[in-house]
Amino acid sequence: MRLMMAGCAAAVAACLCGCAAPAGRAGAPGEAAKAAPALPGTKPTGEVLAKIGDMVITDRDLDEKIKAMPPRVVGRFQSTAGKKNLLNSMVELELIYREAEKEGLDRDKETVERIAEFKKRLAAEKLREKVLDAVKVDKDEVRKEYEKEGDRYKTQKQVKVSQIVFTWDKSAPPQKVEAVKKDAADILARAKKGEDFAELAKKYSLDQASASKGGDIGYATRRALSPEAYKIAMAMEKTGEISGLVEGKDEVRILKAAEIIPEKKKPLEEVSPWLERVVQSKKQREAWTAYLSDLKKKQGVEIYEEKLGESDKGSEGELNAPAGMGDRRIPAPMQPQGAPRQIRLNPGDLKAPGQVQPSGVPVRLAPPSGAPAPMKP
C-alpha cells in the first residue's frame, strides 16, 4: 500500500512539474494543463485512454507527458502500473482544476502573483540562455588553456612492485633484531647477484599473501606499503631495479621494480572536448557578469546594502548568488572555479509567505540537453 501511495504521489508531482499538456494546448504557468476536446466528426490522435466530458486523453498524450519528465523520474512511469498511475493522476488533475476554475481560484490574488513571478523567472532564464548560447570557443583558446593548465592532465607514475619482507616481534631483544637484519642483508646480496627474486620471496618472505606470488603486490600504493617503502618504490627509475634494505616499524623490506609506467601528459586531442567546456564555462561566466553589469549601468541601479546591517561571518558566499540562481558543474577530471549560474525554480520560490507548499511538487527550469551538470564555484 505504501508503494502504491508513493507511486500515485510521484505521478501527481509529475503532472504538476510543467510537463507537456495532454491532447492540445498547455495552460498558463502554475495552472493545470487543459486538453483540447476532439473536434466534431474527427478522431483523436492515438488510442483514447480516458474521457472527461468532451475532452479525451490518448496514449500519445500519455507518452508525450512521460517524455517531458525529468530523467530522474521517467523510469517510474515506464511500467504498466506506472502508466496507469499517471493516467489517473492526469484525469484527477483535470477534474480538480475544473472545479477550482469554477470557484475562481485560478484568478485569486495569490495565484495571479505566483504566475507573474514564475513568468518573470522563466523570461529571465530564457534571456540568460540567449546570452550564454552566444559564447563561442575556438581551437586557439583551447590550446592556450592546455598550455597553461597542462600539468593537471598528467597521469601519475606507477611502479609495479615485488617484495621480500622480514619482521620481528615488538618485544624481541636487540640481538634478535640484528640477526633478522643480517639475514635480510644476505638475501639482498643474493638478489643483487642475480638470483631469482620471485624464488627468494617464496622461500624467505614472511608476508604470506605476497610470498606465494613471488613477492608480487601489484602497483605500489600507500595502503599496501609502509610510508618508507612507498617513498622508495616511487623513486625507482628502472624496471628490474632492486632497493636496499628499507627499514620500517618492526620490519625490513627488499623491493624490486617489476614494471614502471612513467608520468605522462595526456595529448591535447584526448582532453580537447573537456577543455573546450572548461573554456566555455569561464567565458560564459564572464559574459553573464558583464551583461548584468551593463544592465545595472543602463538602468541606473543603486543598491544600499549597508541598510541591511553587517554580514554574518562566512555568509558572504551565500549572498553572492541571487535567489533562484543555480550553478553549472564541469564533470571530472577537473572542476574549475567560476562556472556560469543557472536559474532554478523550486516550490518555495512561488509560495506566499507562511504558506506550506505540498511536498514532491518541484518546479524547475532544467538545463538544455547536454549542458554541464551544476557546480558550486
Image (cartoon, helix red, strand yellow):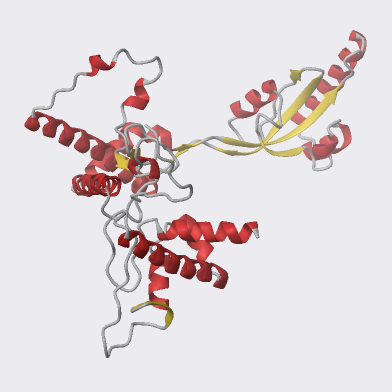
310 displayed left or right of 47? left
The furthest residue to the front: 103
> Does any portion of residue 248 appear in the rendered image?
yes
Q: Based on the displayed image, in which of its 4 quarters is residue 169 positioned?
A: top right
The furthest residue to the top: 174
Q: Residue at x 19, y 47 (%)?
A: 127
How many badges with numbers are in the image? 0
The front one of 85 and 159 is 85
Q: Based on the displayed image, in which of its 4 quarters is residue 281 positioned?
A: top left
Q: Residue at x 82, y 38 (%)?
A: 209
Image quarter where the C terminus lies is top left
Image quarter where the N terminus lies is bottom right
Residue 251 on image: x %, y %: 81, 21
> Does any portion of residue 138 appear in the rendered image?
no
Residue 206 on image: x %, y %: 86, 30
Residue 278 on image: x %, y %: 33, 40
Residue 78 on image: x %, y %: 52, 68
68 displayed left or right of 226? left
- The answer to whether residue 45 is above or below residue 161 is below
